[in-house]
Amino acid sequence: MGDLARLLKESWSLVEEHQDKVAGYFYARMFLSHPDLRDLFPVQMDVQRTRLLSAIVTAVQTLEDPERFDDYLRALGRDHRKFHVLPEHYEVVGGALIESMRSFAGEQWGVEYDQAWADAYAVIASKMLAGADADQNPPYWYGEVVAHERRSHDIAVFTVLPLQPLEFRAGQYLSLEATPYQPRLWRTYSPANAPRRDNSLEFHVRALGAGWVSSALVRRLKVGDMIKLAAPMGTMTLDRRSTRDAVFVAGGTGLAPVKSLLEELTRYNRTRWVHVFFGARTRDDLYDLADLNRLAARYPWLSVVTACSEDPTFPGEQGNISDIVARYGPWNEHDFFVSGSGPMVKATLKTLAELQVPPMRIKYDSFTD
Ligand SMILES: Cc1cc2nc3c(=O)[nH]c(=O)nc-3n(C[C@H](O)[C@H](O)[C@H](O)COP(=O)(O)OP(=O)(O)OC[C@H]3O[C@@H](n4cnc5c(N)ncnc54)[C@H](O)[C@@H]3O)c2cc1C
Ligand code: HEM
């Protein structure tokens, strides 16, 4: 371990236990010295009290070699423009971070720790700033909700029309702010369509019990609302040069990016067999099955397998979709795309590893850590 990494780890270990208090001090310090910064953060700070602090600490500690993470940091800097972050804010945040750690560590803190954090933070901040500076896009786009349909008690499908063109690739995701309901809280969602001439984007969202943004998008959003969208990210895209057959594994609203990729394939595919595995707990959660079946009836290269894990009378497959995939195959010559909740993606990756699918042929998006 390098000297800098050692100093960062050593000093963080002095305060790690009091992370929540350090976060409280960090924000208090920042908002007292720069009250205007309060407007950048969500109304209810308790929602994600330690989010920024832990994000910075993780970045500083794990990005030991910032050159390797150049693209990530530049993208993060670009993305911070949607929060209205300005270059001069970086110094304020860096200062508050070091000061809050120093006050909690007490006498054990040393000047070498100050220097280590200041150096590491400066490298990361400069990369984020360079990314923000080079970006030609607006910090965010306004979009009007032009359709909103409840498909089950906790799932909605809605369409947004950005006021300016917003370029993305099928399979990518972008972050949304449910502006009228949860200002300054951004969450990522995957468009369920390939880029269209009219620029519209369809989203499939499932409201999570305690979820702030998803429940607003499902239960409160309505036609005519204006929301904000930020630049697309993600690499779960099609390689047009690949001639391999493809398998898509989707859990619940993990179907959204899969439909986007399917729509792209309908525009040019003639030669690749495509298999979709779509699973959910109950048949109500298979909220888009009618459209998926319509696609399968229209395109001879497409087949669909559905499964429910908690609906014994469902006529399709029974069980977790991650296990169902293994009942079909063989799959060792296929490209894989996996999308859904964290546990669903993890279980599917495990199945694919057992089936000896080479990891380089698998792309995935996990909705939770
Ligand atoms: C790349 C990517 C693409 C995504 N695409 C979509 C999409 O197309 N459609 C969609 O519906 N969602 C998608 N998500 C998930 C989405 O970004 C949010 O995480 C989700 O809507 C919850 O946000 P929230 O504000 O409602 O919940 P929060 O307020 O952030 O969380 C509330 C509570 O729920 C827990 N929680 C958060 N997410 C989940 C989860 N998935 N399952 C179980 N518990 C959870 C949290 O730990 C927390 O305790 C995607 C996520 C990622 C990372
Ligand atoms: C080294 C510097 C920084 C790093 C590594 C960093 C990292 C991050 C990350 C990873 C997130 C979560 C993003 C998401 O969930 O979409 C975040 C959110 C956020 N950051 Fe930063 N950030 C830095 C500097 C700043 C600065 C200078 C500001 C200005 C005040 C800022 C303001 C915010 C805000 C407002 C949010 C969203 C609100 C929240 O989640 O609490 N960040 N940051």
Image (spheres, helix red, strand yellow):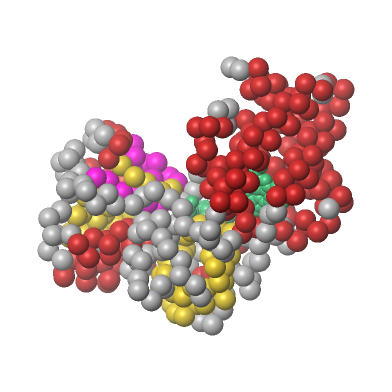
Measured as percent of width and height from the top left, residue 288 is found at: 33, 68
Measured as percent of width and height from the top left, residue 16 is found at: 71, 31
Q: Is residue 338 magenta?
A: yes
For residue 358, which quarter of the picture? top left
Q: Which residues are magenta?
A: 335-350
For residue 15, which quarter of the picture? top right
284 shown above or below 80: below
Identify the residue shown where x is 70% and y is 50%.
87
Q: Is residue 114 magenta?
A: no
Left or right: residue 107 versus residue 168 is right
Q: Is residue 216 among what the camera can see?
A: no
280 shown above or below 49: below
86 shown above or below 346: below
Identify the residue shown where x is 71% and y is 57%.
41
For residue 172, which quarter of the picture? bottom left
Left or right: residue 33 versus residue 145 is right
Identify the residue shown where x is 77% and y is 21%.
112
- Residue most toward the bottom? 224
Q: Considering the image in quadrants, where does the N terminus appear?
A: top right
Given residues 317 and 300, the one toward you in this image is 300
Measured as percent of width and height from the top left, residue 113 is found at: 76, 24
Measured as percent of width and height from the top left, residue 190 is found at: 43, 60
Left or right: residue 312 versus residue 158 is left
Identify the residue shown where x is 65% and y is 41%.
125
Give the mark count: 0
Given residues 83 and 17, the one toward you in this image is 83
Q: Is residue 25 among what the camera can see?
A: yes
